[in-house]
Amino acid sequence: MATPAIPAVARTAGPLDGLRPERSGPPGPADGLVAEHLRLLGAETDGGSGSRLTVAGRDIGGVTARTTWGETATDEATAQAATGMMAVHGRRDGAPRGLAVDYAATATGVLTVQGLLAGLLARARGRHVTEVEVSAERAGLLTVSQYLASAGAEEDEAAELAPGGPPFTSADGVVFELETLDPGVWASFWRTLDAHEESIRRGWRPFQFRYATACAPFPQALHEAVRGHSWERIRYAAEVSGADLCPLRSLAVRATEYDGAAPWELTPHGAAAYTPRRATDADLPLAGLTVLEAGRRIQAPLAAHLLGLLGAEVIRIEPPGGDPLRGMPPACSGVSARWLAFNRDKKAVEVDIKSAADRERLREMAADADVFLHNWAPGKAAQLGLDHEHLTTANPALVYAYTSGWADRLTDAPMGTDFMVQARTGVGEAVRPADEAPAPSLMTLLDVLGGLLGAEAILAGLLLRERTGHGVRVDSSLLGAADVLTAPNRARASRGLDPRRPAGFRHPLPTTDGWIALADHSAIPYDVHDLSTGQALERLRNRGLAAVPVVTDLADLLSSGPINRDAHGAPAVPNPWSFA
Protein backbone atom coordinates (compact mmCIF):
# COMPACT_ATOMS: atom_id res chain seq x y z
CA MET A 1 0.00 0.00 0.00
CA ALA A 2 1.39 3.39 -0.95
CA THR A 3 1.90 5.90 1.84
CA PRO A 4 -0.78 8.60 1.50
CA ALA A 5 0.35 12.12 0.81
CA ILE A 6 0.03 14.40 3.83
CA PRO A 7 -0.97 17.97 3.00
CA ALA A 8 1.32 20.72 4.18
CA VAL A 9 0.08 22.46 7.32
CA ALA A 10 0.77 26.16 7.73
CA ARG A 11 2.79 26.94 10.85
CA THR A 12 2.69 30.06 12.97
CA ALA A 13 5.18 31.16 15.62
CA GLY A 14 5.55 28.50 18.30
CA PRO A 15 5.88 28.96 22.07
CA LEU A 16 9.12 26.92 22.02
CA ASP A 17 10.77 28.69 19.07
CA GLY A 18 14.50 28.99 19.71
CA LEU A 19 14.49 26.34 22.46
CA ARG A 20 16.34 23.05 22.20
CA PRO A 21 15.56 19.74 23.93
CA GLU A 22 18.28 17.34 25.04
CA ARG A 23 17.62 13.83 26.35
CA SER A 24 19.57 11.56 28.65
CA GLY A 25 19.10 8.39 30.65
CA PRO A 26 17.20 5.20 29.82
CA PRO A 27 14.06 5.33 27.65
CA GLY A 28 11.00 6.80 29.32
CA PRO A 29 7.26 6.54 28.73
CA ALA A 30 6.12 8.14 25.46
CA ASP A 31 9.53 9.52 24.39
CA GLY A 32 8.33 9.75 20.79
CA LEU A 33 5.11 11.57 21.64
CA VAL A 34 6.93 14.13 23.78
CA ALA A 35 9.50 14.77 21.06
CA GLU A 36 6.78 15.19 18.42
CA HIS A 37 4.73 17.62 20.52
CA LEU A 38 7.80 19.69 21.35
CA ARG A 39 8.60 19.83 17.64
CA LEU A 40 5.07 20.93 16.80
CA LEU A 41 5.38 23.66 19.43
CA GLY A 42 8.52 25.04 17.78
CA ALA A 43 11.40 23.40 19.60
CA GLU A 44 14.40 22.05 17.75
CA THR A 45 14.82 18.29 18.04
CA ASP A 46 17.75 16.16 19.11
CA GLY A 47 16.19 12.98 17.76
CA GLY A 48 17.13 11.02 20.89
CA SER A 49 15.29 9.30 23.70
CA GLY A 50 15.58 9.11 27.44
CA SER A 51 13.61 9.52 30.65
CA ARG A 52 15.29 12.89 31.36
CA LEU A 53 14.58 15.76 28.99
CA THR A 54 15.88 19.30 29.32
CA VAL A 55 14.37 22.14 27.27
CA ALA A 56 16.42 25.34 27.35
CA GLY A 57 16.89 28.66 25.59
CA ARG A 58 18.92 31.81 26.10
CA ASP A 59 16.03 34.06 27.09
CA ILE A 60 14.21 31.61 29.36
CA GLY A 61 16.71 29.21 30.89
CA GLY A 62 16.06 25.50 31.11
CA VAL A 63 13.63 23.03 32.68
CA THR A 64 14.28 19.29 33.02
CA ALA A 65 11.46 16.74 32.96
CA ARG A 66 11.88 13.22 34.29
CA THR A 67 9.36 10.46 33.58
CA THR A 68 9.02 7.17 35.46
CA TRP A 69 6.64 4.24 35.36
CA GLY A 70 6.06 4.39 39.12
CA GLU A 71 6.51 2.28 42.20
CA THR A 72 4.61 -0.79 40.99
CA ALA A 73 4.42 -0.58 37.21
CA THR A 74 7.30 -1.33 34.88
CA ASP A 75 5.60 -0.71 31.53
CA GLU A 76 2.25 -0.02 29.85
CA ALA A 77 0.60 -3.34 30.68
CA THR A 78 1.51 -3.26 34.36
CA ALA A 79 0.54 0.43 34.63
CA GLN A 80 -2.91 -0.34 33.23
CA ALA A 81 -3.29 -3.23 35.67
CA ALA A 82 -2.09 -1.34 38.75
CA THR A 83 -4.16 1.83 38.26
CA GLY A 84 -7.56 0.28 37.56
CA MET A 85 -7.60 0.94 33.82
CA MET A 86 -8.00 -2.74 32.98
CA ALA A 87 -10.86 -3.01 35.46
CA VAL A 88 -12.76 -0.03 34.02
CA HIS A 89 -12.16 -0.92 30.36
CA GLY A 90 -13.24 -4.49 31.08
CA ARG A 91 -16.58 -3.64 32.68
CA ARG A 92 -18.40 -3.98 29.35
CA ASP A 93 -17.07 -7.55 29.05
CA GLY A 94 -17.45 -8.60 32.69
CA ALA A 95 -13.73 -9.14 33.35
CA PRO A 96 -10.59 -6.99 33.27
CA ARG A 97 -9.24 -6.24 29.80
CA GLY A 98 -6.08 -4.49 28.73
CA LEU A 99 -6.34 -1.60 26.31
CA ALA A 100 -4.36 -2.50 23.19
CA VAL A 101 -3.32 1.15 22.83
CA ASP A 102 -0.65 2.71 25.09
CA TYR A 103 -3.07 4.89 27.01
CA ALA A 104 -1.03 5.32 30.21
CA ALA A 105 2.10 6.24 28.25
CA THR A 106 0.15 8.65 26.04
CA ALA A 107 -1.32 10.43 29.07
CA THR A 108 2.15 10.53 30.66
CA GLY A 109 3.64 12.06 27.53
CA VAL A 110 1.02 14.81 27.36
CA LEU A 111 1.42 15.53 31.08
CA THR A 112 5.19 15.70 30.60
CA VAL A 113 4.80 18.35 27.91
CA GLN A 114 2.37 20.18 30.20
CA GLY A 115 4.94 20.11 32.99
CA LEU A 116 7.67 21.46 30.72
CA LEU A 117 5.41 24.24 29.43
CA ALA A 118 4.31 25.13 32.96
CA GLY A 119 7.90 25.17 34.17
CA LEU A 120 9.04 27.37 31.29
CA LEU A 121 6.08 29.67 31.87
CA ALA A 122 7.00 29.91 35.55
CA ARG A 123 10.59 30.79 34.63
CA ALA A 124 9.38 33.46 32.22
CA ARG A 125 7.32 34.91 35.08
CA GLY A 126 10.25 35.02 37.47
CA ARG A 127 9.97 31.76 39.40
CA HIS A 128 13.02 29.52 39.67
CA VAL A 129 11.67 26.18 38.42
CA THR A 130 14.28 23.75 37.15
CA GLU A 131 12.71 20.28 37.34
CA VAL A 132 9.39 18.51 36.88
CA GLU A 133 8.70 14.83 37.46
CA VAL A 134 5.81 12.80 36.01
CA SER A 135 4.85 9.25 36.97
CA ALA A 136 2.94 6.98 34.59
CA GLU A 137 1.15 5.42 37.57
CA ARG A 138 -0.13 8.82 38.67
CA ALA A 139 -1.08 9.62 35.10
CA GLY A 140 -3.06 6.37 35.03
CA LEU A 141 -4.86 7.27 38.25
CA LEU A 142 -5.77 10.64 36.75
CA THR A 143 -7.33 8.99 33.69
CA VAL A 144 -9.69 6.94 35.89
CA SER A 145 -10.23 9.63 38.53
CA GLN A 146 -13.99 9.90 37.96
CA TYR A 147 -14.41 6.15 38.43
CA LEU A 148 -12.21 6.17 41.53
CA ALA A 149 -14.25 9.04 42.98
CA SER A 150 -17.47 7.11 42.45
CA ALA A 151 -15.99 3.97 44.03
CA GLY A 152 -15.35 5.94 47.22
CA ALA A 153 -18.72 7.69 47.42
CA GLU A 154 -21.36 7.27 50.11
CA GLU A 155 -24.00 6.05 47.64
CA ASP A 156 -24.38 3.42 44.97
CA GLU A 157 -23.48 4.13 41.34
CA ALA A 158 -25.70 6.09 38.98
CA ALA A 159 -26.58 2.87 37.12
CA GLU A 160 -25.87 -0.83 37.44
CA LEU A 161 -22.29 -2.02 36.96
CA ALA A 162 -22.75 -5.11 34.80
CA PRO A 163 -21.56 -6.37 31.42
CA GLY A 164 -23.15 -5.03 28.26
CA GLY A 165 -23.29 -2.10 25.90
CA PRO A 166 -22.85 -0.91 22.32
CA PRO A 167 -21.87 -1.20 19.53
CA PHE A 168 -24.85 -2.58 17.61
CA THR A 169 -24.97 -4.71 14.45
CA SER A 170 -27.55 -4.51 11.66
CA ALA A 171 -29.04 -7.48 9.81
CA ASP A 172 -26.61 -6.89 6.94
CA GLY A 173 -23.56 -6.76 9.19
CA VAL A 174 -22.96 -3.02 9.72
CA VAL A 175 -21.45 -2.43 13.18
CA PHE A 176 -22.35 1.00 14.50
CA GLU A 177 -22.59 3.36 17.47
CA LEU A 178 -25.77 5.18 18.45
CA GLU A 179 -25.85 8.54 20.21
CA THR A 180 -28.51 10.77 21.68
CA LEU A 181 -28.76 12.87 24.84
CA ASP A 182 -32.56 13.02 24.68
CA PRO A 183 -34.79 10.24 26.12
CA GLY A 184 -37.54 11.18 23.66
CA VAL A 185 -35.22 10.66 20.71
CA TRP A 186 -34.06 7.35 22.21
CA ALA A 187 -37.63 6.10 22.52
CA SER A 188 -38.61 7.26 19.02
CA PHE A 189 -35.61 5.52 17.43
CA TRP A 190 -36.40 2.17 19.01
CA ARG A 191 -40.13 2.38 18.37
CA THR A 192 -39.42 2.87 14.68
CA LEU A 193 -37.54 -0.45 14.84
CA ASP A 194 -40.45 -2.19 16.64
CA ALA A 195 -38.58 -2.70 19.92
CA HIS A 196 -40.64 -3.59 23.00
CA GLU A 197 -41.65 -0.65 25.18
CA GLU A 198 -40.34 -2.25 28.36
CA SER A 199 -36.92 -2.79 26.77
CA ILE A 200 -36.88 0.81 25.54
CA ARG A 201 -37.72 2.07 29.02
CA ARG A 202 -35.21 -0.17 30.80
CA GLY A 203 -32.47 0.59 28.31
CA TRP A 204 -32.37 4.36 28.62
CA ARG A 205 -30.77 4.75 32.04
CA PRO A 206 -27.79 2.41 31.47
CA PHE A 207 -27.27 3.93 28.03
CA GLN A 208 -27.48 7.48 29.42
CA PHE A 209 -24.96 6.75 32.19
CA ARG A 210 -22.49 4.65 30.22
CA TYR A 211 -20.08 7.62 30.30
CA ALA A 212 -20.13 7.37 34.08
CA THR A 213 -20.10 3.60 34.56
CA ALA A 214 -18.08 2.39 31.52
CA CYS A 215 -20.75 -0.23 30.84
CA ALA A 216 -24.34 -0.30 29.59
CA PRO A 217 -26.29 -3.42 30.61
CA PHE A 218 -29.42 -2.59 28.65
CA PRO A 219 -31.78 -5.39 27.55
CA GLN A 220 -30.47 -7.84 24.99
CA ALA A 221 -33.76 -7.30 23.16
CA LEU A 222 -32.43 -3.98 21.87
CA HIS A 223 -29.51 -5.73 20.18
CA GLU A 224 -31.99 -8.21 18.73
CA ALA A 225 -34.18 -5.35 17.46
CA VAL A 226 -31.43 -3.83 15.31
CA ARG A 227 -30.25 -7.25 14.13
CA GLY A 228 -33.71 -7.65 12.62
CA HIS A 229 -33.37 -4.63 10.34
CA SER A 230 -31.16 -3.57 7.46
CA TRP A 231 -28.72 -0.70 7.76
CA GLU A 232 -30.94 1.32 5.42
CA ARG A 233 -33.92 0.87 7.75
CA ILE A 234 -31.83 1.73 10.82
CA ARG A 235 -30.62 4.91 9.14
CA TYR A 236 -34.24 5.80 8.40
CA ALA A 237 -35.13 5.30 12.09
CA ALA A 238 -32.29 7.63 13.07
CA GLU A 239 -33.36 10.24 10.53
CA VAL A 240 -37.00 10.38 11.65
CA SER A 241 -36.14 10.29 15.37
CA GLY A 242 -33.15 12.66 15.39
CA ALA A 243 -30.66 10.08 16.70
CA ASP A 244 -27.05 10.03 15.49
CA LEU A 245 -25.40 6.93 14.04
CA CYS A 246 -21.80 6.18 13.14
CA PRO A 247 -20.54 2.95 11.55
CA LEU A 248 -17.25 1.77 13.01
CA ARG A 249 -14.47 2.94 10.68
CA SER A 250 -11.18 1.12 10.34
CA LEU A 251 -7.72 2.41 11.15
CA ALA A 252 -6.79 1.93 7.51
CA VAL A 253 -9.55 4.31 6.44
CA ARG A 254 -8.48 6.88 9.03
CA ALA A 255 -4.87 6.57 7.83
CA THR A 256 -5.84 7.40 4.24
CA GLU A 257 -7.89 10.48 5.20
CA TYR A 258 -5.60 11.81 7.94
CA ASP A 259 -4.71 15.43 7.14
CA GLY A 260 -1.48 15.67 9.13
CA ALA A 261 -2.82 18.38 11.41
CA ALA A 262 -1.45 18.89 14.92
CA PRO A 263 -3.80 17.94 17.78
CA TRP A 264 -4.29 21.62 18.53
CA GLU A 265 -3.96 24.95 16.80
CA LEU A 266 -2.49 28.15 18.25
CA THR A 267 -3.38 31.39 16.50
CA PRO A 268 -1.86 34.65 17.83
CA HIS A 269 -4.09 37.66 17.40
CA GLY A 270 -3.83 41.44 17.47
CA ALA A 271 -0.98 43.69 18.43
CA ALA A 272 1.17 42.97 21.45
CA ALA A 273 -1.11 43.70 24.37
CA TYR A 274 0.12 41.61 27.28
CA THR A 275 2.33 42.90 30.08
CA PRO A 276 4.02 39.97 31.85
CA ARG A 277 3.05 39.47 35.49
CA ARG A 278 5.82 38.47 37.84
CA ALA A 279 5.32 35.55 40.21
CA THR A 280 7.01 34.90 43.54
CA ASP A 281 9.35 31.97 43.93
CA ALA A 282 6.85 30.24 46.26
CA ASP A 283 4.03 30.30 43.69
CA LEU A 284 2.82 27.44 41.57
CA PRO A 285 3.51 28.02 37.86
CA LEU A 286 0.10 29.59 37.06
CA ALA A 287 -0.40 31.51 40.32
CA GLY A 288 -1.91 34.93 39.68
CA LEU A 289 -3.63 33.87 36.45
CA THR A 290 -7.41 33.58 36.08
CA VAL A 291 -9.26 30.99 34.00
CA LEU A 292 -12.96 31.36 33.12
CA GLU A 293 -14.40 27.95 32.26
CA ALA A 294 -17.80 27.39 30.65
CA GLY A 295 -17.58 23.63 30.28
CA ARG A 296 -19.80 20.60 30.66
CA ARG A 297 -19.14 16.92 31.28
CA ILE A 298 -15.41 16.05 31.08
CA GLN A 299 -13.26 17.59 28.34
CA ALA A 300 -13.24 21.31 29.24
CA PRO A 301 -13.77 20.82 33.01
CA LEU A 302 -10.75 18.48 33.17
CA ALA A 303 -8.59 20.93 31.21
CA ALA A 304 -9.52 23.71 33.64
CA HIS A 305 -8.99 21.39 36.62
CA LEU A 306 -5.41 20.74 35.52
CA LEU A 307 -4.78 24.48 35.16
CA GLY A 308 -6.12 24.88 38.69
CA LEU A 309 -3.74 22.23 39.99
CA LEU A 310 -0.95 24.29 38.43
CA GLY A 311 -1.99 27.35 40.46
CA ALA A 312 -4.53 29.25 38.34
CA GLU A 313 -7.72 30.59 39.86
CA VAL A 314 -10.51 28.78 38.00
CA ILE A 315 -14.00 30.30 37.88
CA ARG A 316 -16.72 28.06 36.52
CA ILE A 317 -19.54 29.66 34.56
CA GLU A 318 -22.68 27.73 35.50
CA PRO A 319 -26.35 28.14 34.52
CA PRO A 320 -28.90 29.60 36.96
CA GLY A 321 -29.37 27.10 39.75
CA GLY A 322 -25.87 25.69 39.24
CA ASP A 323 -24.48 22.86 37.15
CA PRO A 324 -27.11 20.06 37.17
CA LEU A 325 -24.29 17.50 37.14
CA ARG A 326 -23.47 18.50 40.74
CA GLY A 327 -26.35 16.24 41.72
CA MET A 328 -25.35 13.26 39.59
CA PRO A 329 -25.06 10.17 41.81
CA PRO A 330 -23.15 8.87 43.61
CA ALA A 331 -22.57 11.74 46.04
CA CYS A 332 -20.12 12.69 48.78
CA SER A 333 -21.54 15.16 51.32
CA GLY A 334 -24.38 15.88 48.93
CA VAL A 335 -22.18 16.66 45.91
CA SER A 336 -21.56 14.32 42.98
CA ALA A 337 -18.28 12.48 43.50
CA ARG A 338 -17.75 12.32 39.75
CA TRP A 339 -18.36 16.07 39.41
CA LEU A 340 -15.85 16.74 42.20
CA ALA A 341 -13.19 14.73 40.36
CA PHE A 342 -13.04 17.46 37.70
CA ASN A 343 -14.36 20.53 39.51
CA ARG A 344 -13.21 20.57 43.11
CA ASP A 345 -11.67 23.82 44.36
CA LYS A 346 -13.14 25.89 41.52
CA LYS A 347 -15.16 29.01 42.21
CA ALA A 348 -18.57 29.22 40.54
CA VAL A 349 -20.55 32.10 39.10
CA GLU A 350 -24.07 31.60 37.79
CA VAL A 351 -24.61 33.25 34.41
CA ASP A 352 -27.70 32.99 32.23
CA ILE A 353 -26.18 33.05 28.76
CA LYS A 354 -29.68 33.42 27.31
CA SER A 355 -29.87 36.84 28.96
CA ALA A 356 -28.31 39.83 27.16
CA ALA A 357 -27.43 41.43 30.51
CA ASP A 358 -25.69 38.28 31.76
CA ARG A 359 -23.79 37.86 28.49
CA GLU A 360 -22.49 41.40 28.91
CA ARG A 361 -21.48 40.53 32.48
CA LEU A 362 -19.57 37.52 31.14
CA ARG A 363 -17.77 39.74 28.60
CA GLU A 364 -16.75 42.03 31.45
CA MET A 365 -15.40 39.06 33.41
CA ALA A 366 -13.43 37.92 30.35
CA ALA A 367 -11.91 41.39 30.06
CA ASP A 368 -10.04 40.73 33.32
CA ALA A 369 -9.23 37.04 32.72
CA ASP A 370 -6.20 35.35 31.23
CA VAL A 371 -8.03 32.35 29.76
CA PHE A 372 -11.59 31.81 28.58
CA LEU A 373 -12.36 28.13 27.98
CA HIS A 374 -15.54 26.48 26.70
CA ASN A 375 -16.79 23.35 24.94
CA TRP A 376 -20.17 24.57 23.73
CA ALA A 377 -21.74 23.08 20.61
CA PRO A 378 -20.27 24.32 17.31
CA GLY A 379 -21.52 27.80 16.44
CA LYS A 380 -23.07 28.49 19.84
CA ALA A 381 -20.38 30.95 20.99
CA ALA A 382 -20.79 33.04 17.82
CA GLN A 383 -24.56 32.94 18.16
CA LEU A 384 -24.28 34.27 21.73
CA GLY A 385 -21.76 36.99 20.86
CA LEU A 386 -19.16 35.20 23.02
CA ASP A 387 -16.81 33.97 20.33
CA HIS A 388 -13.12 34.77 20.00
CA GLU A 389 -13.58 38.06 18.15
CA HIS A 390 -16.18 39.28 20.65
CA LEU A 391 -14.16 38.66 23.82
CA THR A 392 -10.77 39.72 22.49
CA THR A 393 -12.11 43.12 21.50
CA ALA A 394 -12.17 44.04 25.17
CA ASN A 395 -9.18 41.87 26.11
CA PRO A 396 -6.62 41.52 23.28
CA ALA A 397 -4.31 39.59 25.61
CA LEU A 398 -6.87 36.83 26.22
CA VAL A 399 -6.03 33.18 25.59
CA TYR A 400 -9.35 32.04 24.10
CA ALA A 401 -9.66 28.25 24.20
CA TYR A 402 -12.22 26.00 22.55
CA THR A 403 -12.26 22.25 23.12
CA SER A 404 -14.51 20.69 20.49
CA GLY A 405 -15.40 17.30 19.10
CA TRP A 406 -14.21 17.57 15.50
CA ALA A 407 -12.40 20.93 15.07
CA ASP A 408 -14.23 21.34 11.73
CA ARG A 409 -11.80 18.86 10.16
CA LEU A 410 -14.35 16.29 8.90
CA THR A 411 -17.30 17.14 6.68
CA ASP A 412 -19.35 14.01 7.48
CA ALA A 413 -18.85 14.04 11.24
CA PRO A 414 -21.64 12.82 13.55
CA MET A 415 -22.29 14.23 17.02
CA GLY A 416 -18.91 15.01 18.60
CA THR A 417 -19.07 12.79 21.68
CA ASP A 418 -16.43 10.40 22.98
CA PHE A 419 -17.87 7.15 21.68
CA MET A 420 -18.87 8.56 18.29
CA VAL A 421 -15.35 9.93 17.75
CA GLN A 422 -13.92 6.55 18.79
CA ALA A 423 -16.16 4.85 16.21
CA ARG A 424 -15.40 7.30 13.39
CA THR A 425 -11.61 7.32 13.80
CA GLY A 426 -10.77 3.64 14.25
CA VAL A 427 -10.19 3.83 18.01
CA GLY A 428 -12.73 1.03 18.40
CA GLU A 429 -10.39 -1.16 16.36
CA ALA A 430 -7.19 0.06 18.02
CA VAL A 431 -8.21 -0.57 21.63
CA ARG A 432 -8.85 -4.29 21.09
CA PRO A 433 -6.38 -6.94 19.86
CA ALA A 434 -6.99 -9.04 16.76
CA ASP A 435 -8.99 -11.77 18.55
CA GLU A 436 -11.60 -9.31 19.87
CA ALA A 437 -14.28 -7.68 17.75
CA PRO A 438 -13.70 -3.93 17.28
CA ALA A 439 -15.70 -1.89 19.79
CA PRO A 440 -15.17 1.57 21.27
CA SER A 441 -14.17 1.43 24.92
CA LEU A 442 -16.92 2.60 27.27
CA MET A 443 -14.18 4.12 29.41
CA THR A 444 -14.13 7.80 28.42
CA LEU A 445 -10.79 7.56 26.65
CA LEU A 446 -11.10 10.59 24.37
CA ASP A 447 -12.92 12.92 26.76
CA VAL A 448 -10.06 12.49 29.23
CA LEU A 449 -7.26 12.63 26.67
CA GLY A 450 -9.04 15.56 25.01
CA GLY A 451 -9.01 17.37 28.36
CA LEU A 452 -5.29 16.64 28.78
CA LEU A 453 -4.54 17.97 25.29
CA GLY A 454 -6.75 21.00 25.92
CA ALA A 455 -4.71 21.90 29.00
CA GLU A 456 -1.46 21.30 27.10
CA ALA A 457 -2.62 23.64 24.32
CA ILE A 458 -3.69 26.36 26.78
CA LEU A 459 -0.31 26.18 28.53
CA ALA A 460 1.35 26.52 25.12
CA GLY A 461 -0.86 29.55 24.43
CA LEU A 462 0.03 31.14 27.75
CA LEU A 463 3.75 30.62 27.15
CA LEU A 464 3.45 32.01 23.62
CA ARG A 465 1.67 35.07 25.02
CA GLU A 466 4.37 35.47 27.66
CA ARG A 467 7.12 35.40 25.05
CA THR A 468 5.45 37.55 22.36
CA GLY A 469 2.93 39.76 24.15
CA HIS A 470 0.14 38.59 21.83
CA GLY A 471 -3.13 37.01 22.87
CA VAL A 472 -3.76 33.57 21.39
CA ARG A 473 -6.71 31.54 20.16
CA VAL A 474 -6.35 27.86 21.10
CA ASP A 475 -8.36 25.07 19.47
CA SER A 476 -8.23 21.41 20.48
CA SER A 477 -10.57 18.49 19.91
CA LEU A 478 -11.54 14.89 20.57
CA LEU A 479 -10.52 14.18 16.98
CA GLY A 480 -7.02 15.41 17.84
CA ALA A 481 -7.03 13.15 20.90
CA ALA A 482 -8.01 10.16 18.75
CA ASP A 483 -5.24 10.91 16.27
CA VAL A 484 -2.65 11.17 19.04
CA LEU A 485 -3.78 7.91 20.62
CA THR A 486 -3.81 5.92 17.38
CA ALA A 487 -0.71 7.42 15.74
CA PRO A 488 1.31 4.15 15.95
CA ASN A 489 -1.63 2.19 14.49
CA ARG A 490 -2.05 4.65 11.62
CA ALA A 491 1.67 4.46 10.89
CA ARG A 492 1.46 0.66 10.60
CA ALA A 493 -1.64 0.91 8.40
CA SER A 494 0.10 3.42 6.11
CA ARG A 495 2.92 0.91 5.57
CA GLY A 496 0.44 -1.82 4.63
CA LEU A 497 0.89 -3.65 7.95
CA ASP A 498 -1.82 -4.92 10.29
CA PRO A 499 -2.61 -1.91 12.50
CA ARG A 500 -4.01 -4.05 15.33
CA ARG A 501 -2.12 -5.81 18.11
CA PRO A 502 -1.90 -9.62 17.83
CA ALA A 503 -4.39 -12.01 19.39
CA GLY A 504 -4.09 -12.28 23.16
CA PHE A 505 -2.28 -8.98 23.53
CA ARG A 506 -2.54 -7.63 27.11
CA HIS A 507 -5.07 -10.26 28.18
CA PRO A 508 -4.74 -10.53 31.99
CA LEU A 509 -4.54 -14.08 33.34
CA PRO A 510 -7.02 -15.48 35.89
CA THR A 511 -5.81 -17.04 39.13
CA THR A 512 -7.80 -18.80 41.84
CA ASP A 513 -8.45 -15.52 43.66
CA GLY A 514 -7.94 -12.75 41.09
CA TRP A 515 -5.99 -11.77 38.00
CA ILE A 516 -2.39 -10.98 37.10
CA ALA A 517 -0.91 -9.01 34.22
CA LEU A 518 2.48 -9.67 32.71
CA ALA A 519 4.68 -6.95 31.35
CA ASP A 520 4.43 -6.49 27.61
CA HIS A 521 6.53 -8.89 25.53
CA SER A 522 6.74 -11.41 28.38
CA ALA A 523 5.82 -15.03 27.67
CA ILE A 524 4.34 -17.01 30.54
CA PRO A 525 5.99 -20.45 30.92
CA TYR A 526 2.98 -22.26 32.50
CA ASP A 527 -0.71 -21.99 33.33
CA VAL A 528 -1.51 -20.05 36.52
CA HIS A 529 -5.26 -20.64 36.82
CA ASP A 530 -4.72 -23.22 39.63
CA LEU A 531 -2.43 -20.87 41.57
CA SER A 532 -3.32 -18.00 43.87
CA THR A 533 -2.32 -14.53 42.77
CA GLY A 534 0.50 -14.49 45.32
CA GLN A 535 1.83 -17.89 44.22
CA ALA A 536 1.69 -16.95 40.54
CA LEU A 537 3.53 -13.68 41.11
CA GLU A 538 6.22 -15.38 43.22
CA ARG A 539 6.91 -18.03 40.57
CA LEU A 540 7.02 -15.49 37.76
CA ARG A 541 9.34 -13.16 39.66
CA ASN A 542 11.64 -16.08 40.50
CA ARG A 543 11.99 -16.52 36.75
CA GLY A 544 12.78 -12.82 36.32
CA LEU A 545 9.40 -12.01 34.75
CA ALA A 546 7.68 -8.74 35.63
CA ALA A 547 4.03 -9.12 36.63
CA VAL A 548 1.54 -7.36 38.92
CA PRO A 549 -1.88 -8.16 40.37
CA VAL A 550 -4.72 -6.58 38.40
CA VAL A 551 -6.82 -4.13 40.38
CA THR A 552 -10.37 -5.38 39.87
CA ASP A 553 -12.16 -3.37 42.59
CA LEU A 554 -11.32 0.33 42.47
CA ALA A 555 -12.16 0.60 46.16
CA ASP A 556 -8.95 -1.34 46.85
CA LEU A 557 -6.95 1.63 45.55
CA LEU A 558 -8.59 3.96 48.07
CA SER A 559 -7.09 2.20 51.09
CA SER A 560 -3.53 2.14 49.80
CA GLY A 561 -1.28 4.34 47.74
CA PRO A 562 -1.36 8.10 47.27
CA ILE A 563 -5.12 8.76 46.95
CA ASN A 564 -6.48 11.28 49.48
CA ARG A 565 -9.93 12.67 50.34
CA ASP A 566 -11.08 16.20 49.60
CA ALA A 567 -13.16 18.49 51.84
CA HIS A 568 -16.33 16.65 50.79
CA GLY A 569 -14.83 13.25 51.59
CA ALA A 570 -14.48 12.33 47.91
CA PRO A 571 -11.37 10.46 46.72
CA ALA A 572 -8.83 12.78 45.08
CA VAL A 573 -5.94 11.47 42.99
CA PRO A 574 -2.51 13.06 43.51
CA ASN A 575 -1.12 15.75 41.24
CA PRO A 576 0.47 14.12 38.22
CA TRP A 577 3.56 16.37 38.35
CA SER A 578 5.92 17.60 41.04
CA PHE A 579 8.03 20.73 40.53
CA ALA A 580 11.35 21.75 42.03
Image (cartoon, grey):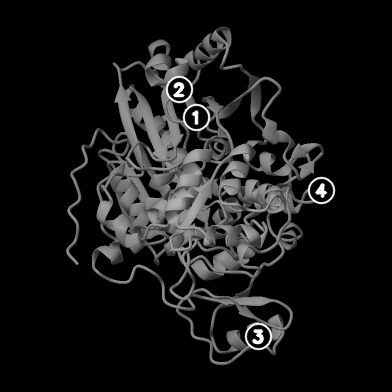
* Comparing labels 3 and 2, the label whose residue is closer to the camera: 2
The residues tagged by marks 1 and 2 sit, at their Cα atoms, a distance apart of 7 Å
Quick one: SS at disc 3? Answer: helix
Q: Which mark is residue 536?
A: 3
Check disc 4 and give the amino acid type: Glu
The residues tagged by marks 3 and 2 sit, at their Cα atoms, a distance apart of 56 Å
Above or below, 128 relative to 83: above
Instruction: Answer with mark 3 or mark 2, whichever residue precedes in sequence.
Output: 2
Instruction: Answer with mark 1 or mark 4, whichever residue precedes in sequence.
Output: 4
The residues tagged by marks 4 and 2 sit, at their Cα atoms, a distance apart of 37 Å
**Disc 4 crowd, CA 10 A, few/some/many (<14, 14-19, 20+):** some
Residue linked to disc 2: 381
Say which residue appears at 68% left-offset and 67% top-offset. 552
Say which residue appears at 69% left-offset and 25% top-offset. 322
Check disc 3 and give the amino acid type: Ala
Check disc 2 and give the amino acid type: Ala
The residues tagged by marks 3 and 4 sit, at their Cα atoms, a distance apart of 35 Å
Instruction: Answer with mark 3 or mark 1, whichever residue precedes in sequence.
Output: 1
Residue linked to disc 4: 155
Check disc 1 and give the amino acid type: Trp
The residues tagged by marks 1 and 4 sit, at their Cα atoms, a distance apart of 30 Å
Q: Report whether residue 192 is seen.
A: yes
Using residue 508 as the reference point, say whether residue 235 is left or right of it.
left
Above or below, 421 relative to 349: below
- Is 88 or 69 nearer to us in this picture? 88
The residues tagged by marks 3 and 1 sit, at their Cα atoms, a distance apart of 50 Å
Q: Report whether residue 567 is seen.
A: no
Residue linked to disc 1: 376
**Disc 1 crowd, CA 10 A, few/some/many (<14, 14-19, 20+):** some
